[in-house]
């Protein structure tokens, strides 16, 4: 059980180091790419 707690804590600190701006930028990029691949078929 302790290893899961350590893993969760390290993940939390990792996400805390990433700025909110970068997270939103990545989110927008991912959603935009999904919409692009949905509406534009790669022929």
Image (cartoon, rainbow, N blue to C red):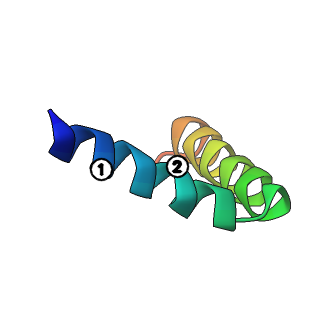
Give me the residue at 22% from left, 39% from top.
Answer: 4
Q: CA separation, marks 2 and 1?
A: 9 Å
**Depth check, front residue: 9 or 18:** 9
The residue sitting at 60% across, 37% down in the picture is 39
The quadrant of the rendering that contains the N terminus is top left
Q: Which residue is mark 1?
A: 7
Q: Which mark is residue 12?
A: 2
Find residue 33 and report its horizontal and vertical position in percent.
Answer: 60, 51
Rendered view: 37 above or below 42? above
In the visual, does 5 lie left or right of 25? left
Provide the secondary structure element on which disc 1 rests.
Answer: helix
Q: Secondary structure at mark 2?
A: helix
Point out residue 5 in the picture as x, y percentages from the top left corner.
30, 40
Quadrant location, the C terminus? bottom left
Mark 2 crowd level (few <14, some 14–19, many ≥20, 10 Å Cα): few
- For this view, does 5 lie left or right of residue 39? left
Q: Alpha-carbon neighbours of circle 1 within 10 Å: few (<14), some, or many (≥20)?
A: few
């Amino acid at each position: 059980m302790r290893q899961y707690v350590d893993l969760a804590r390290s993940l939390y600190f990792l996400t805390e180091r990433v700025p909110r701006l970068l997270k939103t930028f990545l989110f927008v990029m991912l959603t935009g790419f999904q919409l692009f691949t949905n509406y534009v078929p790669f022929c």
